[in-house]
Image (spheres, grey):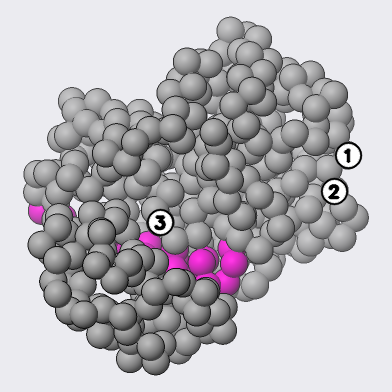
Amino acid sequence: MMHYRPLGNTGLTVSEIGMGCEGFFEEDHAMARKLFDAAEKAGVNYFDLYSPDPEMRKAVGEAIRGRREKFIIQGHLCSVWKNGQYLRTRDLKEVRQAFEEMLAILGVSFVDIGMIHYCDSLKDWETILENGILDYAMELKGEGKIRHIGLSSHNPVVALKAVETGKLEVLMFSINPCYDLQPPDEDVEKLWADEAYEKPLLNMDPDRQKLYERCAERGVGITVMKAFGGGDLLDASLSPAGVALTPAQCIGYALSRPAAATICCGVHSVSQLEECVAFEALPAEKRDFAEALASFPKISWKGHCMYCNHCLPCPKAINIAEVTKFYHLAVAEGKLPETVREHYKVLEHHAGDCIQCGACEKRCPFSVPIRDNMKKAREVFGY
């Protein structure tokens, strides 16, 4: 059975497994209908549509005709089709024209998420502001042609800058256990470059951690791209870590990040979609990513909570990962936000219930000082 999550504060409830649009190109676009049929059957209700290819959009429009209400569309602004190929633009006139064409070709009156497409540099973000593109997205929202405003990015510093404007409701971001180790950069190709993994890598990049936590605190939902690293993480000979992960481990990792709501899986066939959907029914040991991550050569997450729940069961039934998440959110903000306080409050058991037995630390694959974290969380929350 498919599980669903709130998409930040949008009011939308999305399937944990979503679809990227890569497979919509297969079989001269005939695969689109097959994928949407399989998606509806499986309860997949979210899909991304970054490509401006008019033939692909036409196929998607035909595939969802008569069942538009069953799907949440993440459509992109600034993605245009010129001379038979995709281009990104910051020309407002082109952006307006391309968006209206998207609605017309899809045969819909609105898209749920208007995603400002592919911003990886601070200069480009300034261009988006200066050229009126964010203002246009807000205009479209006011007209009901988009319901929520989003941005897609691979750079946590740029993404955080955009999130902190308070205008974004959804962020599309690349999340997987290799990219999360890399520092921010305006060159997206460095995320998978061999040289980026030649030296030992220690723990998650703090800018990425800060971004996830800030999104969670502000109610900005994250839709995940590149959870499989373009497929490289599934092949030991291609994986930057030198170890192959399963689709379930990649999905489990991405969904464990704060604010992550749905994984836009770039499937190319119905069988690949079904393999991703099968994640929902897998036992915990098949979803588990912690032991695989702990075995990565030249990579260490020592001392960093991965929210993997290997620490459980707690004799006091504390949900250690959730307590730790809320503690991290409070630390990231430098204060105790009301939303975090209230989410912590409704937990059945709290950090103050910890008896400091240390059983959790013996099970943790990443040597996290859990007892210290519980003490600190109790100080922050008061119980």
At label 1, counting other C-alpha atoms closer than 10 Å, the crowd grade (few under 14, some 14-19, many 20 or more) is few
Q: Amino acid at mark 1?
A: Ser
Disc number at residue 257? 3
Q: Is residue 22 above or below residue 26?
A: below
The image quadrant of residue 111 is top right
Amino acid at pointer 2 = Lys
Dot placed on the residue nearer the N-terminal end, 1 or 2: 1
Label 2–label 3 contact, CB within 8 A: no
Q: Is residue 207 above or below residue 281?
A: below
Could you tell me if the residues under marks 1 and 2 are in contact, i.e. CB atoms within 8 Å?
yes
Residue 180 at x, y percent in the picture:
32, 53
Which quadrant would residue 314 be assigned to in this image? bottom left
- Residue 280 covered by magenta stretch: no
Q: Nearer the viewer, residue 265 or 58?
A: 265
Q: What residue sits right under mark 1 in the picture?
A: 109
Residue 210 magenta-highlighted: yes
Give SS at disc 3. Answer: loop
Q: Is residue 9 visible?
A: yes
Magenta highlight range: 198-220
Indicate the amino acid at tag 3.
Arg
Per the image, label 1 sits on a secondary structure element best described as loop
User: Whole-percent x and y of residue 339?
Assistant: 57, 78
For the residues labelled 2 and 3, the Cα–Cα distance comes to 30 Å
Q: Is residue 32 visible?
A: no
Q: Along the polypeptide, which appears first: circle 1 or circle 3? A: 1
**Residue at position x 53%, y 16% from top?**
270
Q: Which residue is mark 2?
A: 145
